[in-house]
Image (cartoon, rainbow, N blue to C red):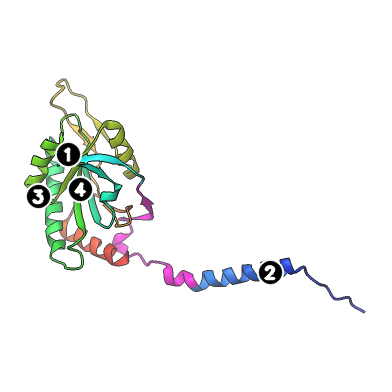
Amino acid sequence: MISKIEFPKGTIFLFASFIFLLVMVFVLLPATKKIIPEDLIAVLRPDAIPLQPFTLIDNNEQVFTNKNLKGNWSFIFFGYTHCPDICPTTLLTLKKINKLLKKNHKTASNIQVIFVSIDPERDKPEDLKKYITYFNKEFIAITGHTDKLNNFTRQFSAAYFKEASDNTDDYLMSHTSSIFLVDPKMRIIASFSPPHDVETITSQYLKIHNMY
């Protein structure tokens, strides 16, 4: 006579739970997986990076924190007001992108462009206000003390440094020239590398906006 093998109820429950979870993974995975368009492969981050708390100051001498990003799609660019070429060119590009996106009722309400000065020694709030207003009165410019500024730039892996110069007041800053995109949940989700083309970035942004 063959004796009947009885498994502990706990073992049966764990096995059943494992099978249930395995089935749920296979059922839900196809529905949640995003299909990334070919032209976004080099733009989208593999994983969205949540921004950690930071405190800077804007061109109106108001405190600017991560809360100012919540609920908005933010184009963020790092530079400085004495920049001879890259910064003004990129801000003019962002001006054109912003104008195009403002025409689309689906994207007009919560887009903001933020210029981050990595030269706080020379770029005071009043200087930033004059500079950024030239491109667009709605654009925001921010900066801060070196330690707080570094806390912010490190989160984007946005490197910068002051170039050697004999003149303490006239020097150049080397800096990251990519445009970063932060979503309404305050996560870094994309970056647009130069050369920056208005039509390309606008098209890529709209695809990203629809995906998220």
| The stretch drawn in magenta includes residue 35 | yes
Q: Residue furthest front?
A: 62
x, y (%) of residue 2?
A: 89, 77
Q: Residue furthest right?
A: 1
Q: Is residue 183 left or right of residue 4?
A: left
User: Label 2, on which residue?
Assistant: 13
Q: Is residue 142 left or right of residue 5?
A: left
- Type of residue at label 2? Phe
Q: Do the residues bearing badges 3 and 4 touch, measured as CB atoms within 8 Å?
A: no
Q: CA distance from mark 1 to mark 4?
A: 15 Å
Choose mark 4 or mark 2, whichever is in front. 2
User: Label 3, on which residue?
Assistant: 137
- Quarter in which the C terminus is drawn: bottom left
Q: CA distance from mark 2 to mark 3?
A: 63 Å
**Label 4 SS:** strand
- Magenta region: 28-51
